[in-house]
Amino acid sequence: MKKITYILTGLFLFVAVVGANAQASQECNIKYNLFKGDANTGKSEEAKVNLEYLLQNCPKLSVNIYKIGAKVAGKLKDPVLAKKIYETRLINFPAKGAAKAHSDYATYLVKNKLATDAEIFVILKKAYDISPKDMGVKNIFRYFKSVTEENKDTNPQKVFDTYDDVMESVQVKLDGYSKKITLLQEKDSLGTIGLKEAKRLKGYTINSSALGQVEGGLDAMISKLATCERLIPIYTRDFEANKTDGVWLKRAVSRMYNKGCQTDPLFEKLANSYAEATQSADAYNFLAGVLVKNGDKRGAAEMKKKAFNLETDPFKKAKYKLREAQNARGSRARALAYEALRYNPNMGKAYLFIASLYQKSANSCGSDEFEKRMVYVAALNKALKAKKVDPGCGAGRYISSYRKNMPSKKLIFQKGVSSGASHKIGCWIGETVRIP
């Protein structure tokens, strides 16, 4: 009899616990839905009440509690609540979107002037160590600037490594936006784009443009530090320890190439080791440049072909073609840039490269000032195209420069031509443009 009593008591307790848990779970869901409704309709004070309940009683219900809650705290300008949301999220969702959570909290602290630069840097480093590509645009720049200022004189290699990590993450983001923009622009041109898609297109365009500005800012900072005079001793010193490290070799040879250090014997040494260590399309492409420098044009052509055929990613194929174009001149360089655009039609840098070719030929592609300045119109058209298809390519400064050099109204009048009329540019450019 006692045994039956124990069993019935245990069963009763089990049912009671299950019932209580079910009731608590139901209450959490009710509070969660009320919280979302209030937050989405701008009732922040009402949302805060249910948010506090959720943080206390249902912290693992959904990560959206914290995503939406952070916005509520921002609208209320409540730093205590914001900190509680940030810390509680990391306890209950330590891996889900943690980099963005750190970055967003750093942004909140900066915006409201609630922490020192040193405290902000600690939080941004947490985000960076998890995933640089999930950091906010301004925070990527903020983090790299801090690293540069701290290490530029004592540990420049730390700055270079950070730059490479950040730029690779930025490029991943830019490539992602470019692919999305391409698809949506195609729908937009056909008139089949929906309202939500149009909104996304606008968002992708804004974000891509902002990332392009960050890329330009990072380049400006690193260019002062990464000179051939500084790079060569560092890479010479570290070569033996890294001669089989494909990532290190790729970064070293890329930086040497971008800074124009190819004439130094170290570049050839790095390129050969990179090719041997990775046997990748990228490595063979650099090796082709070494063969050209050594006078082996046939070998270089075969190596470029090998690199190109080995690559399967059309975006990377486009980059190889553009790099080849940058080592050519005139119409040949333009033809290679257009080949790059076949693989990535939204490659703004290819259009900017063509624009720069035109600009450099301004003095030789016209018989008078008007004709020379009309070359800048052709360059401007390419830069505007770059900005349209690839908002993150940094076309803004090119556009500004080319506009300043177009023919003035006075010069157009003196030439005896009309604004809006067609004008064919001579020499190798051979394009017809509209007179401004």
Image (cartoon, helix red, strand yellow):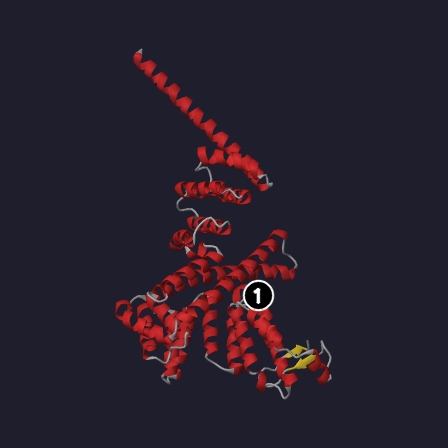
Q: How many marks?
A: 1
Q: Is residue 32 visible?
A: no
Specify whether 145 is left or right of 366. left
Rendered image quadrant of residue 415: bottom right
- Quadrant where the C terminus sits is bottom right
**Which residue, given by chain and number where applicable, does mark 1 sit on?**
389
Specify whether 150 is left or right of 200. left
Pick out the residue farthest to the top: 1
Comparing 432 with 5, the one in front is 432
Rendered image quadrant of residue 307: bottom left
- Provide the secondary structure element on which disc 1 rests: helix
Comparing 423 with 377, the one in front is 377
Indicate the position of residue 405 as horizontal and vertical percent values: 61, 78
Kindly identify the amino acid type of the residue bearing the numbered disc 1: Val
Indicate the position of residue 46 as horizontal and vertical percent values: 56, 35
Q: Residue at x 45, y 54 (%)?
A: 134
Rendered image quadrant of residue 267: bottom left
Specify whether 233 is left or right of 426. left
Q: Is residue 171 visible?
A: yes
Q: Is residue 195 above or below residue 217?
A: above
Q: Residue at x 45, y 74 (%)?
A: 323
- Quadrant where the N terminus sits is top left
Pick out the residue farthest to the bottom: 367
Q: Residue at x 43, y 42 (%)?
A: 89
Indicate the position of residue 406 as horizontal and vertical percent values: 64, 78
Indicate the position of residue 378 as horizontal and vertical percent values: 61, 77
